[in-house]
Image (cartoon, grey):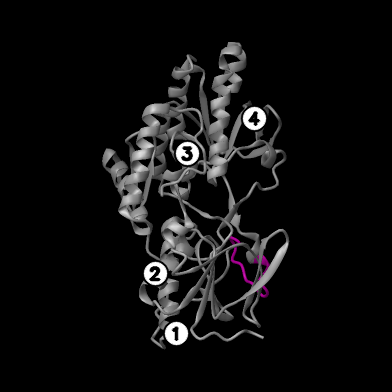
Amino acid sequence: MKIKTKTPHVVVVGGGFAGIEVVKTLRAIDATVDITLVTKSRIFEYYPALYKLVTGALPIEVSVPVEKIVPKNKVHIVYATYTALDQERQVITINDGDDTTREVAYDYLVLALGSETNFFNIKGLPELSYSFKSVTAALALKQHFCELFSKAHTMTKEILVSMLHVLIVGAGPSGVELAGDLRSYLSRLAREFAVDPGLVTIDLIEAAGRVLPSMPEKVSFIAEARLRKMGVNIFVNRALASQEVEEVILKDMSMNSHTVIWTAGTRINTAYTAIPNIQLDEHKHVIVSETLSLPHDNHVFIAGDGAATKYGGLAQSAIEHGKYIAMTIDATIKNKKVKPFVPIRPTFVIPIGVDWAILNYNNFVMTGFIPWILRSMADFRYFLHIVPLSYVFGVFEQGKKYRKTQGGCPVPPTEKTIS
């Protein structure tokens, strides 16, 4: 039987964009509600900028300790993994580690479990490819590049051509941003290690007919022209079939490469599919009501990548979900009218290389330095939303000093933080 609480108990599972926004908004509008945040990571990772870790940023520039965002004296933080939901008893089961499980009761539950990498059962891909879906993965990729260039002086030109051949699979926003940044970064590393920059090859592979396939064709054409001008090779209508140790096999061709970076697919957290009576749409996202709750249970909300909403799967959408759900829970507790969720059309700003970006909103497109500044301002504004200005400036100064004094390699310690 569910344990009764003196005040409504809201349990939020997931410390990403949606989960953090639920907690911050609910705490701001209702200081009396009891909130528990369950997250398996002690670090909030700013996914839109993780690619920068590969090309020279410090971990602290794209990640923040959860307790810097959500003070423990205001929210109960539990570092654990969500494993199951019992809707009838209104409890979730979590694993605190070492196979220790326990139950947490809730009055309102928000599941913001995020997404997972989807390798589509492609042979060899999980074991042999790199990604940058986390700070750890991004740093591993950067370390890989540093090791390649540190060994370059011992290799023949023929071997270097293969060793410095980089394949990025997936030309969505993440793949396009990384391709542009890598072109500049690897050329700089080559010069630092006295390697001919002309030996560096970057290929961007996309299964669809154009880069940025989810955006208007005009945006795709501009992005493709920019990448080609920077020296990135683009192959569209190419589906990856398998990956061997030194060879990537596409649908109708093969390539030699020691670095394959996978950005092509994600799927919702598989824990969602274990919810009793769960319903998924054709894209395998959880069908929700007009208030983002489960259709058959208005005490359980789905936020972020898992929810089947228009414009879903984006950081902006996850933040909107979090804010809306917090306000809905508050209104429900206070017996106020609840308005249905209305998704907001996002503005896309995609950096491609240094000081250049492409902005797209509806039918409006802008390119160049101004969109790049707007993207930088958007990132800066979000960090100010979750941490104090002093913290942001402290991180900026450390990052600036690191890039000035240490260059592209070696990889810095991951545990370094701002106090």
Q: Quadrant of residue 256?
A: top right
Instruction: Name the residue carrying label 1.
Output: 333
In this figure, which residue is indicated by the disc labeled 4? Answer: 253
Mark 1 falls on what kind of element?
helix
Which residue appears at 29% of the width and 47% of the height?
Answer: 374
Give the CA separation, mark 2 to mark 4: 51 Å
Query: Which residue corresponds to mark 3?
Result: 53
> Which numbered disc, 2 or 3, marks the residue that appears first in the sequence?
2
Q: Residues within 10 Å of mark 4 (few under 14, many from 20)?
A: few
Question: From which residue to which does the magenta span run?
Answer: 273-284
Number of residue marks? 4
Image point (36%, 75%), residue name = 29
Name the element at disc 3: helix
Q: Earlier in the sequence, mark 1 or mark 4?
A: 4
Instruction: Name the spot of residue 328 as percent of width and height, x first.
Output: 43, 77
What is the distance, in whole Å, between disc 1 and disc 4 at their CAs?
A: 59 Å
Quadrant for the N terminus in the image: bottom right
Furthest toward the bottom, the residue is: 335
Percent coordinates x, y for residue 117 in the rendering: 61, 49
Mark 2 or mark 4: name the one nearer the start of the chain: 2
> Of helix, strand and loop, which mostly describes the magenta segment?
loop
Q: Earlier in the sequence, mark 1 or mark 2?
A: 2
